[in-house]
Amino acid sequence: MTYRIGYLVGSLSSTSINRRLSKALIKLAPAELEFFEIGIGDLPLYNTDLEAELPAPVVALKQAVESADGLLIVSPEYNRSIPGPLKNALDWGSRPWGKNSFAGKPTAVIGASIGAIGTAVMQAALRTVLGFLDVPQLGQPEGYLTFSPEVYGEDGTVHSEDTKAFLRAYLGAYSAFVARNLADAAEQAA
């Protein structure tokens, strides 16, 4: 079985190290995971005044999230928290009230930074938001990566066997998590 996985990169920068990480993850993923990017750069800032007639980028975001079997969030940490563009996407995707596109989507969170603790603080904050949005989350393994340009090529090539092994194991665990969650959801619906 193939699972369509929408991935969101929490940085808007075209040279983001997390965009590089997303390319590496896609290259190393098991065959059953098919990825497509869910862009967040064109979203207006969240404003309840716009909920009556959702802007086209918001409709596109919600449709993309809803079409995915699961989600992968690859994000930096900004000022010890969630980057604004990513939080904005979560706010839009969960609105208007009662139309939360993220609910029930099996999700994994991973991120890289140049610091020694990776994106641990951002991920803790993000997991709280995702919990409120009723998003099942991969708990283990956790993915707090210290970025080194020698390890991650611009095209997504990973030059460290240890890093490749970790990322493959991470994606294998995520694939199994998606399969379990979708099977559970189908059983509950039956």
Image (spheres, rainbow, N blue to C red):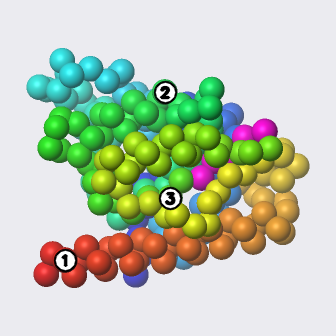
Give the Cα separation between the discs numbered 2 and 1.
35 Å
Q: Position of residue 70 (x, y in %)?
A: 39, 62
Q: Position of residue 11 (x, y in %)?
A: 57, 34
For the residue labelled by badge 2, is the local secondary structure a helix, a strand or a loop?
A: helix
Depth order, front residue of 139/70: 139
Q: Which residue is mark 3?
A: 108
Q: Relative to residue 167, is residue 189 drawn left or right? A: left
What mark, if any, has residue 188 been given in the picture?
A: 1
Please state which amino acid type lies under the numbered disc 3.
Answer: Ala
Please state which amino acid type lies under the numbered disc 1.
Answer: Gln
- The quarter holding residue 134 reads bottom left
What mark, if any, has residue 102 been given in the picture?
A: none
Q: Position of residue 40 (x, y in %)?
A: 43, 35
What segment carries the magenta color? 110-115
Of pointers 1 and 3, the one earlier in the residue sequence: 3
Residue 9, placed above or below residue 79: below
Q: Which residue is mark 2?
A: 84
Mark yes or no: residue 13 visible: no
Q: Is residue 32 magenta?
A: no
